[in-house]
Image (cartoon, grey):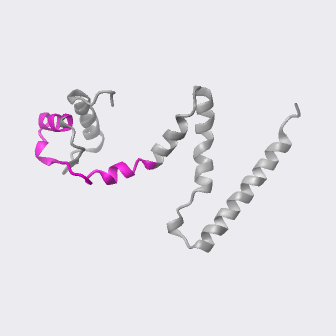
């Protein structure tokens, strides 16, 4: 959005969201007054829900993005950031499998296969490099 979370920024965000996703039965927001003012202008102030744990589901959906964002904060140059971002997703998906979706034996087997493939790629990359 913007650096300041004022009514105009909230209104712009809500209109864009409504245009993309359609009307909602309820709007779960944090307790900022700018959201209430924007929803009042749209005419949906009665459908706003704020609460201590109401927005947890929406906030937790961003965790993977936040983790990647934290890693990107280290970079000072755009070029090195682009190089990192182009490789990060494929490597991250290669090694990070959901532990809760499989048994321990299956998880260990998949992890060992991923490490073996990674080592094979690393040795193949080392052989193809030009000597300096």
Horizontal and vertical percent for residue 65?
46, 44
Q: Which corner quadrant of the image does residue 71 belong to?
A: top right
**In this image, 56 relative to 72: left or right?**
left
Horizontal and vertical percent for residue 57?
33, 54
**In this image, 111 relative to 7: left or right?**
right
Question: Is 110 located above or below residue 6 in the figure?
Answer: below
Question: Is 55 located above or below residue 104 in the figure?
Answer: above
Q: Which quadrant, please, contains the C terminus?
A: top right
Residue in the image at 27% along x and 54% along y: 53
Q: Main secondary structure of the magenta part?
A: helix
Residue 55 on the magenta segment: yes
**In this image, 76 relative to 116: left or right?**
left
Question: Is 2 located above or below residue 58 in the figure?
Answer: above
Horizontal and vertical percent for residue 82?
59, 32
Residue in the image at 58% along x and 38% along y: 85
Camera-nearest residue between 4 and 98? 4
Which region is colored magenta?
Answer: 34-63
Q: Which quadrant, please, contains the N terminus?
A: top left
Camera-nearest residue between 132 and 12? 132
Residue in the image at 58% along x and 56% along y: 96
Residue extending farthest right: 131
Horizontal and vertical percent for residue 49?
18, 49
Residue 106 on the magenta segment: no
Q: Which corner quadrant of the image does residue 23 belong to?
A: top left
Residue in the image at 50% along x and 67% along y: 100
**In this image, 68 relative to 7: left or right?**
right
Question: Is 36 located above or below residue 109 in the figure?
Answer: above
């Amino acid at each position: 959005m913007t650096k300041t979370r004022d009514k105009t920024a909230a209104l712009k965000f809500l209109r864009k969201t409504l245009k993309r996703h359609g009307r909602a039965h309820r709007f779960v927001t944090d307790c900022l007054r700018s959201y209430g003012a924007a929803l009042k202008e749209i005419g949906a102030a009665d459908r706003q829900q704020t609460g201590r744990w109401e927005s947890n589901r929406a906030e937790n959906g961003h965790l993977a993005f936040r983790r990647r964002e934290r890693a990107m904060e280290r970079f000072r140059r755009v070029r090195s950031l682009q190089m990192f971002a182009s490789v990060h997703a494929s490597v991250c998906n290669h090694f990070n499998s959901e532990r809760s979706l499989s048994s321990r034996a299956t998880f260990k087997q998949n992890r060992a296969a991923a490490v073996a493939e990674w080592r094979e790629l690393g040795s193949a990359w080392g052989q193809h490099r030009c000597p300096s």
